[in-house]
Image (cartoon, rainbow, N blue to C red):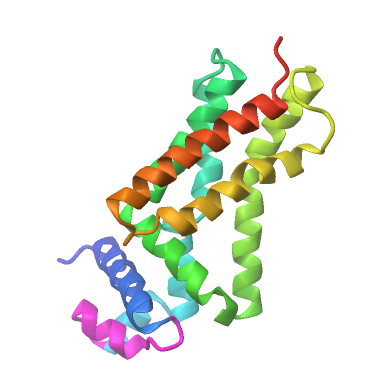
Amino acid sequence: MVNKNSIKDRILEEALFLFLDKGYHGASMRMLARRVGIRGSSLYNHYPNKEAIFSALLKKAGPQLLGIQIEQILQQNREQTPSEIIFAIVNQLSENWFQEKESCLFLLLIRESPLFALNVRTHVGQMVQSAMQPLTDYIESLQRRGIFQPDFPAYFLSWQLLAPLANLRLNYLLPNSSPEDKSKGRELIDLHMNYFIKRNLIPE
């Protein structure tokens, strides 16, 4: 008997590469069924439409995973200094970028997001906000302790940390980036991290 979960995983994997190849709107359920090697009717037994498939992709490799990982880092590194914890968060983020599925999904989001329905774009935006919340809460706790710059709200400082990293990713750390670009990207990430910490962290 074929494992139903393995078929669903195969559908998602093939869907991701099909969307990248043909574009979200250029891909069809029939094309996807052909790639997976199942009948169209069988595909609809698992997912009713492309939007449901895309939502499932986001749940498996979308931005909300960062929020979960940030929470884990904060729980596992309570004894570390704030700078060490922030570096650990960014290092985890960088590791995610080199996972094939996560990288391909990011590329798909950047390329196709203007074409997605409004409810899909809103959903992605909400996932990003949710993923950032643990970092925002942590920075806010540092501000209350008087060891982080109080000039700006914690949510703004979270964006100040992560937004330049997203820009570096677009320029240097895509799936097809050269080894030289990836090396330059890592170097610039380290520079940004050092700047962010020196600019905002107040020595105890």
Q: Residue at x 56, y 33 (%)?
A: 193
Magenta run includes residue 28: yes
- Percent position of residue 102, x then y: 39, 56
Find residue 48 and report its image quarter. Answer: bottom left
- Percent position of residue 145, x then y: 78, 17
- Percent position of residue 112, x then y: 50, 76
Viewer-closest of 165 and 2 = 165
Find residue 147 and report its image quarter. Answer: top right
Magenta run includes residue 184: no
Can residue 131 be seen here? The reply is: no
Instruction: Count up the numbered dots.
Output: 0
Stretch of the chain drawn in magenta: 24-39
User: Is 31 left or right of 200, judged from the image as shown?
Assistant: left
Can residue 116 be seen here? The reply is: yes
- Percent position of residue 10, x then y: 26, 67
User: Is 148 left or right of 168, judged from the image as shown?
Assistant: right
Q: Is residue 204 above or below residue 30?
A: above
User: Is 78 left or right of 24, judged from the image as shown?
Assistant: right
